[in-house]
Amino acid sequence: MGDLLERPREAFSDALLGIIEPPAAPEIVVVDIDRKAIQGLPDQDWNRADTATLLSRLAALKPKVVALDFVFSSGCVSPDASNGALGDAIGAVPTVLGFLIAETVREAPRPIPPLAVRKPLSVPDLWFIDGAETSCGPLMDRSRAAASAFLVGDEDARIRRVQPYAVLGQAAYPTLALEAVRQVTGGTPILGGAPLWLRLNRTVFDLDADGSLRFAPGDAKALAARTISASDLLGGEADAGRLAGKLVFVGSSLPHLGGLRPTASMPLEPSVQIHADIANSLLTGFVPRRTLWQTPAESLGALILGLAVAFAALRLRPLTAAGLGFGFVLAVTGAAAGIYATSAVLVDAIGLSLAVIAPLLLTGTLQFARIRRQEAKARSKFSQYLPSSVVNRFMDEAGDGGIVGEEREVTAFFTDIEGFSTLAQRHGPRELIALLDIYFAEVTAIVARHGGMVDKIVGDAVHALFNAPEDLPDHVQHALDCAAEVERVTQAMCRRPEFAARGFGRTRIGIETGMAVLGEVGAGGKLDYTAHGDAVNLAARLQDANKFLGTSVCIGPVAAARSGRPLTPLGRHEIRGFGEMALFTNRAPAAS
């Protein structure tokens, strides 16, 4: 049962961690080698010489420690002067260098930070690694300490916790954030206990059963508040007061320079910001955790709560009992949020909520059985006055507003953005979503103006129907007019500065008319009103056919015949799954 509830519990914890903002440690600053910094370079390529220059500028501002979220493992024997310059820059400021997991050990990480242990001590298996990818030896020799910079996600790839130490051979290396905090606060960390705990100065952190340490992720606002662009630092625009005596993490939010990983607060967070989040939790002491007394206390609370709800539900009307249960769940959720916000303790709100829901379901099932018996009596009674078929139809179909199996002629309308996959690879998700929001708002508005219904949006594609769900006279004409306007508007859109700068592609459109079956598809709480038929599938293929036809709008034979307007023939072509057919467009084909 515990395994079944693990994912819902993690999802609830993610919601708390994503909504409740943790306290911020003023000591932490993140220097981000962002797009602005790259664009300011002559060749727009960040290299070791640029890192050396950045560290030299940092050294002049006298931060207390710099933690680098980079591993300089290649080019160690190169005569390139940038290696020497980088080594000098690392030596000029207290620097912690990270390393990654590897299958072998080319060169052991160094220097090894201090660590004290207190027995009994059982080191978790997850802490042991077989090898490490380190920075070049001369660079490590100039650094203050070596630390593990790798981040291991849960089964869903989210980074929720970190292993405080990685054990390689006979040496234990702290995670990058832990070592950076130690450099700031001084002292020697102490490990001990069963279950395991970590003491850093006067603060003791209880670790999870697998030896991991949870952290509270910051939201976008918190990340922005502690971040300085490397461009501002290199250009002398950064406030020196923000960096003097601070713990500075240096990394990148660009995918090709730094890792982007999902956390509880955002779908993609730069790894350097995750290390800063971990350091923030350690410095503030706000570490999400569960205490030893929670499990027995929650079990007892769940038992008492379940009995109370079951007792009340048997004596109340179903709607009243459901309202009572809903109120209990809200109260438990609110209490869990309040406890976390004030103490960082994670309460098992899922288990406690199930203690409310389970007896409600049980009593609901018993009441349903009672209602079914009463219904059978009612059928028998009414059958004495009306034919059984009429009674059954009334009782079985009353209030059924479902739209099932309606067959009608529709004009299917499919769009797609040319080169979208390449566009997605070149630009970050935030930039892409901002463009798509504008694109979809304008395209769907055009569809609505011409009387169409947007069936769904899938990725970068819009699926629309004309003459559904209500009658639309001359629906083929409306679809063709819609296509012309979408083509004109999206072509103009591609010339707008924000779209042109990112190489936003043209819109391809496929249109065909035919019979389709419309209705609600799905089960439970997830229903979808959609259409099924050859015309719908063919419209999707025709949109794709624009690739080899060199057109923006491809119209099927039935829609062309029904349009009654002059169209440009494209000849007969083979369409996968439909055979050879005559195709048309609303204008002459573009040059390939």
Image (cartoon, grey):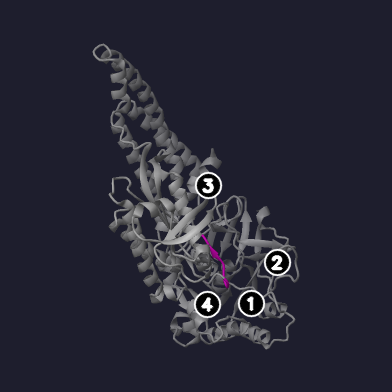
| Gap between marks 3 and 2 measured at Cα | 35 Å
- Helix, strand or loop at disc 2? strand
The residue that disc 1 covers is 144
| Gap between marks 4 and 1 measured at Cα | 22 Å
Q: Residue at x 50, y 63 (%)?
A: 549
Q: Nearer the viewer, residue 505 or 218?
A: 505
| Gap between marks 2 and 4 measured at Cα | 25 Å
Instruction: Please state which of the two labelled residues, at mark 4 or mark 1, is closer to the viewer.
Output: 4
Q: Is residue 115 above or below residue 83?
A: above
The residue that disc 3 covers is 292
State the extent of the magenta-drawn residues as a range. 256-263
The residue that disc 2 covers is 132
Asked if residue 141 lies in the magenta stretch, the reply is: no
| Gap between marks 1 and 3 measured at Cα | 37 Å
Residue type pointed to by label 2: Ala
Q: Earlier in the sequence, mark 2 or mark 1?
A: 2
Residue type pointed to by label 4: Ile
Q: Is residue 182 left or right of residue 103?
A: left
| Gap between marks 2 and 1 measured at Cα | 18 Å
Q: Quadrant of residue 431?
A: bottom left
Asked if residue 261 lies in the magenta stretch, the reply is: yes
